[in-house]
Image (cartoon, helix red, strand yellow):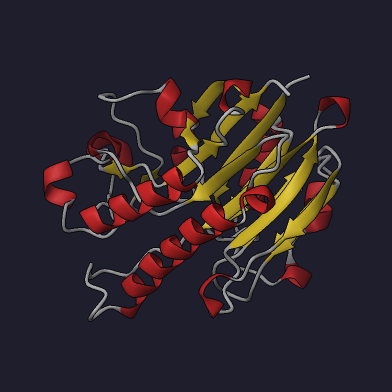
């Protein structure tokens, strides 16, 4: 039986729990990974999701900011919630989800810092934090291989807050000096990916030059007509495990749902 996994920056889980319920009703993923939940663990609306069948829940949250969570219909256990950069931010959680034959799939759910507005670490501490976070991801993936990607297979997903390819943004030329698409960020993200030779299954299945976005700003009066998006959300599978992914869907229409997040879900199906 396939394992379907959705990742979505929900931009406040309490404000948009009805949208999570809609995703569950329309697409029925086995696992839903959320970012930017913006609530402490004690305030997370677990009971609402348990009623939808997501009885296994792991949360790493904080008041008003950041936060990640994993909802699962299959048995799972929390592995680690790593505190990157000693900032006290809730930006990562890893779980093992049950697969066939006693196997498990490790899922790393990330919310990488956005980085502020000025792409200069000398004058912008938020951008410096983003680069340091990416460097720490690279070091961790490279030095603690088994902890990150055990033999049964692993996934890195979430809002990585970088659109790495030219066709991941509406205008490569105009966004080269805009945080999320600057060369220093895209190069850092590629270093993270190469640390364990992760496979970007979204772009494997929907290759360039097709434009592909997962985020559209709230500032646009008509987001769909302007279509000035960026692909900030990602799904990577560990090398040797990526063939298990046989379907990728970017749920663009969710950006038009009532009171939407500015991000949309990505759903992948794994034959595991």
Counting from the top left corner in percent of width and height, residue 248 is at 52, 25
| Left or right: where 6 falls relative to 184 | right
Q: Residue at 61% across / 51% down in the picture? A: 109
Counting from the top left corner in percent of width and height, residue 142 is at 52, 53
Seen in the picture, residue 163 relative to 110 is either above or below; the reply is above
**Outermost residue toward the front in this view:** 143
Q: Say how many tags the image has.
A: 0
Q: Residue at 29% across / 25% down in the picture? A: 208
| Left or right: where 92 falls relative to 191 | right
Q: Residue at 44% across / 33% down in the picture? A: 252
Q: Quadrant of residue 130?
A: bottom left
Seen in the picture, residue 186 relative to 207 is either above or below; the reply is below
Q: Front-most of 65 and 156? A: 156
Q: Front-most of 95 and 60? A: 95
Q: Quadrant of the C terminus?
A: top right
Residue 259 in view, yes or no:
no
Q: Residue at 47% across / 42% down in the picture? A: 234
Q: Quadrant of the N terminus?
A: top right
Counting from the top left corner in percent of width and height, residue 4 is at 68, 29
Counting from the top left corner in percent of width and height, residue 5 is at 65, 35
**Outermost residue toward the left in this view:** 173
Seen in the picture, residue 100 relative to 139 is either above or below; the reply is above
Residue 186 in view, yes or no:
yes
| Left or right: where 240 falls relative to 187 | right
């Amino acid at each position: 039986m396939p394992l379907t996994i959705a990742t979505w920056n929900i931009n406040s889980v309490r404000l948009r729990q009805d949208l999570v319920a809609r995703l569950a009703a329309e697409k029925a993923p086995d696992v839903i990974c959320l970012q930017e939940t913006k609530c402490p663990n004690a305030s997370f609306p677990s009971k609402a999701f348990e009623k939808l069948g997501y009885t296994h829940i792991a949360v790493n949250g904080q008041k008003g900011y950041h936060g990640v969570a994993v909802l699962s219909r299959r048995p799972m256990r929390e592995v680690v919630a790593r505190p990157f950069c000693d900032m006290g931010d809730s930006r990562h959680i890893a779980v093992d989800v049950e697969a066939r034959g006693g196997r498990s799939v490790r899922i790393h759910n990330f919310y990488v810092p956005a980085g502020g507005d000025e792409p200069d670490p000398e004058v912008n501490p938020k951008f410096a934090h983003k680069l340091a976070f990416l460097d720490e991801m690279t070091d961790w993936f490279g030095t603690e291989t088994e902890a990150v990607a055990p033999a049964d297979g692993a996934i890195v997903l979430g809002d990585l807050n970088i659109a790495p390819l030219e066709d991941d943004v509406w205008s490569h030329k105009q966004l080269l000096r805009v945080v999320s698409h600057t060369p220093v960020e895209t190069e850092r993200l590629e270093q993270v990916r190469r640390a364990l030779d992760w496979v970007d299954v979204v772009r494997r299945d929907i290759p360039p030059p097709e434009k592909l976005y997962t985020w559209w700003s709230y500032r646009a009066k008509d987001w769909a007509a302007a279509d000035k998006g960026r692909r900030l959300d990602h799904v990577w599978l560990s090398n040797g495990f990526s063939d298990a992914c046989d379907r990728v869907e970017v749920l663009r229409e969710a950006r038009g749902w009532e009171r939407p997040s500015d991000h949309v879900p990505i759903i992948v199906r794994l034959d595991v």
